Amino acid sequence: PTIGQLFNFSFKGSPVDYKMGIMAYRLGRAEVLSGCGVKNAGWDGIYASRGSTINAEGAIASGAGHFGILATLSSTINASGADASDAGEACISAQSSSTINAEGAIASGAGTNGIFVSTGSTINAQNATGTLSQAKNTLTYQGIIFQA
């Protein structure tokens, strides 16, 4: 699907009621247009898992309760210029051999790290804001975060 709307969630109440914003699962695909997406998702704002791809250049995934933008299990998210700020955990996270292109993204105000890489993943964070989970441009077993 193509998402051409900005949704504003409210994650009040019990944590079991917290919901994902935009999700692609098991080779799923989605496109989020610039200026569109989900604010204040109870769990993750934009989430791709199990070989899925989401194109979200300029999208909004701010204020998420867990991760603003999360790619896991060999997925890809293209989120250049996206706003994933103020997430409860990490603003942008690539896990389990995934890739996120987040050039110029906003990843500030995170509960832990603005940009978090783990288990062999890659994040392009050129000109992005936010703290890093490891030294930039350094390959580790967790992966690599490219940043000038």
Image (spheres, rainbow, N blue to C red):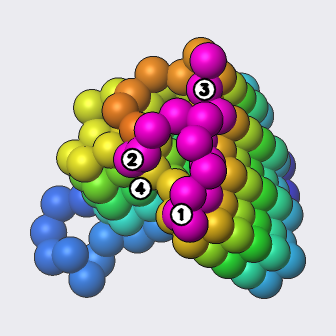
> In the image, is 41 to the left or to the right of 61?
left
The answer to whether residue 90 is magenta is: no
Mark 2 residue crowding within 10 angstroms, few (<14) / some (14–19) / many (20+): some
> Which quadrant would residue 16 be assigned to in this image?
bottom left
Query: How far is the residue under mark 2 from the one under mark 4?
Result: 14 Å
| Tags 2 and 3 touching, CB below 8 Å | no
Q: Earlier in the sequence, mark 1 or mark 3?
A: 1
The amino acid sitting under disc 1 is: Gln
- The circle drawn on residue 30 is none
Give the SS element for disc 3.
Answer: loop
Residue type pointed to by label 4: Phe
For numbered disc 1, what is the local secondary structure?
A: loop
| Quadrant of the rendered image containing residue 25 | bottom right
Q: Earlier in the sequence, mark 1 or mark 2?
A: 2
Residue 127 lies, in percent from the top left, at: 59, 16
Residue identified by numbered label 3: 147
* Residue topped by disc 1: 142
Distance from the alpha carbon under mark 3 to that under mark 4:
20 Å
Image height of 17 relative to 45, above or below: below
